[in-house]
Image: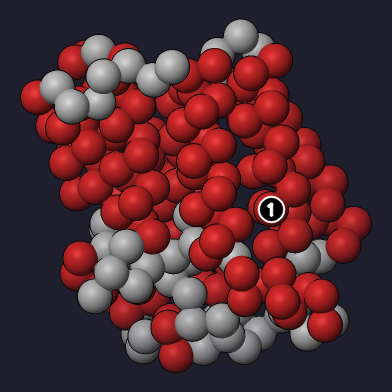
Amino acid sequence: MLPDLATPAALGGLALGYALGSIPFGLILTKFAGLGDVRAIGSGNIGATNVLRTGRKGLAAATLLGDALKGTVAVLLAKNLGEGAALAAGLGAFLGHLFPIWLGFKGGKGVATFIGVLLAFNAAALGLFAAIWLGLAFALKYSSLAALAASAATPLALWAFGAPTQALLFLILAVLLWWKHAPNIRRLANGTEGRIGQKG
């Protein structure tokens, strides 16, 4: 069972997480680099995979780092208020990335922020996530497929590692991540999904 998420501390963690999670690093970095609106290319997403389609690997890496660390920082800050606040902050950061108020609630797909939140909670589960993602991404060149498989494995790993409350949180995050990847799933099925490094 999850801790009580209706406490003032948990609600504060949720708000903190959402505020940090809604920072659109991909959009900010590409605009400062003079590349215009990253939503106008490729998949139209603001995440690192789409930023990579500009051909700027450094910007893509910076986007990945920023989107991950906003989840990590939110959870670590909220941990000072208790487990419920930390879990709420992780959820808030993920929701903020997916549905940022600044962009009309049209944000990214959550992979980097998922990773960042996981880093704050369980390094062993993150290692498994990374191994699955890197293996599939290297072999098949599909970032979306690699992320879907790794995210699906994460709640199971956390449960196996004896962290049921974290497993439940990441089950929720994984379901949201898969929902946001519905267009990618359709493109994977019909063979039109873009590959890693492919320009838009």
Q: Name the spot of residue 173 as percent of width and height, x first.
A: 49, 43
Q: Is residue 23 left or right of residue 171?
A: left
Residue, disc 1: 148
**Residue at the image position 79 percent from the left and 56 percent from the top:** 137
State whether residue 162 is above or below residue 125: above
Q: Say which of 72 and 31 sits in front.
A: 72
Q: Secondary structure at mark 1?
A: helix
State whether residue 17 is above or below residue 7: below
Q: Is residue 188 left or right of residue 79?
A: right
Q: Is residue 21 left or right of residue 40?
A: left
Residue 157 visible at all: yes
Q: Name the spot of residue 31 as percent of width and height, x first.
A: 32, 79
Q: Say which of 79 and 183 sits in front.
A: 183
> Residue reaching furthest front?
1
**Residue at the image position 16 percent from the left and 32 percent from the top:** 11
Quadrant of the frame with the N terminus:
top left
Image quadrant where residue 93 sits: top left
Q: Name the spot of residue 174 as percent of width and height, x first.
A: 56, 45
Image quadrant where residue 76 sits: top left
State whether residue 181 is above or below residue 14: below
**Residue at the image position 62 percent from the left and 30 percent from the top:** 155
Snapshot colouring: secondary structure
> Residue reaching furthest left?
8
Quadrant of the frame with the C terminus:
bottom right
Mark 1: few/some/many CA within 10 Å (<14, 14-19, 20+):
many
Q: Say which of 172 and 52 sits in front.
A: 172
Q: Is residue 186 left or right of residue 5?
A: right
State whether residue 26 is above or below residue 1: below
**Residue at the image position 34 percent from the left and 72 percent from the top:** 106
Q: Name the spot of residue 195 as percent of width and height, x first.
A: 76, 74
Which amino acid, mark 1?
Leu
Residue 73 visible at all: no
